[in-house]
Image (cartoon, helix red, strand yellow):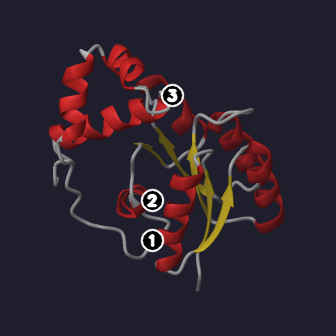
Amino acid sequence: MTISLLLVDDEVFFRERLGRAFEKREYKVFLAENYDQAMAIVNKHRPEMAVVDLRMPGKSGLELIRDALAIHPDMRIVVLTGYGSIATATEAVKLGAVSFLPKPADVDDILSAFSKNTELGIPGAEENFHAPSLARMEWEHINRVLHDCQGNISAAAKKLGLHRRTLQRKLNKFPPDN
């Protein structure tokens, strides 16, 4: 039996890459870039699982969780965001999300979050989760901020509270392995 999954994220590259990774694991994947597209898919296909980004143009992921679960209460939702806070995580779980993960997350992280809910029986979820190193998290955060600044080193350095040359040195290093 194929499990259906809705991926909602406004970042095209991330959404499509994650979609391909789930398809390789034999999930039926539906992709949406915003609230309206996601709600149309929920109404038509009733996916069993959803991965929802919190920040999107238009209505937020929190509104999507509330409205999608009102229509399809059996759907299980994991929330992803690059801008998470304790308050938003709490709100997402109160609205019915199974779990809350910071970006970037891969398929194993997401399946692990879904598998914490024992009712799901998700195949292929990794049992031993290995948290990324602090150096890896720093590298990913720097690259996320740089992406948000459209590659502008000076703007990213200012947002990060770093000198421009310090940021350039950090960017010239290879990403940590773990």
Kindly give the residue lying farthest to the bottom in the view shown.
1
What kind of residue is marked 1?
A: Ile
Identify the residue at image location x=26%, y=66%: 127
Mark 2, other Cα within 10 Å: few <14 / some 14–19 / many ≥20: many
Residue at label 3?
88
Disc 2 marks which amino acid? Phe
Q: Amino acid at mark 3?
A: Thr
SS type, badge 1 = loop
Which numbered disc flags the more N-terminal residue, 3 or 1?
A: 3
Percent x, y of residue 2: 59, 82
Q: Is label 2 in contact with label 1 (beta carbons under 8 Å)?
A: yes
Residue at 16% x, 54% y is: 177
* Residue at position x 83%, y 64% in the image: 44
Residue lying at 74% horizontally and 52% vertically, measured from the top left: 38
Kindly indicate whether the residue at mark 1 contacts the one at mark 3 (C-beta within 8 angstroms). Answer: no
| Quadrant holding the N terminus | bottom right
The CA distance from mark 2 to mark 3 is 18 Å
Residue holding disc 1: 122
Q: Is residue 29 left or right of residue 129?
A: right
Q: Is residue 173 left or right of residue 79?
A: left
| Along the viewing direction, whichever of 91 and 110 lies nearer the viewer | 110
Q: State the separation of the CA atoms marked 3 and 1.
A: 25 Å
Earlier along the polypeptide chain: callout 2 or callout 1?
2
Count every numbered label the image shows and give the total.
3
- Residue 99 in the image: state x and y as whole percent: 45, 46
Vertical comparison of 27 with 155: above or below: below
Q: Which residue is mark 2?
A: 114
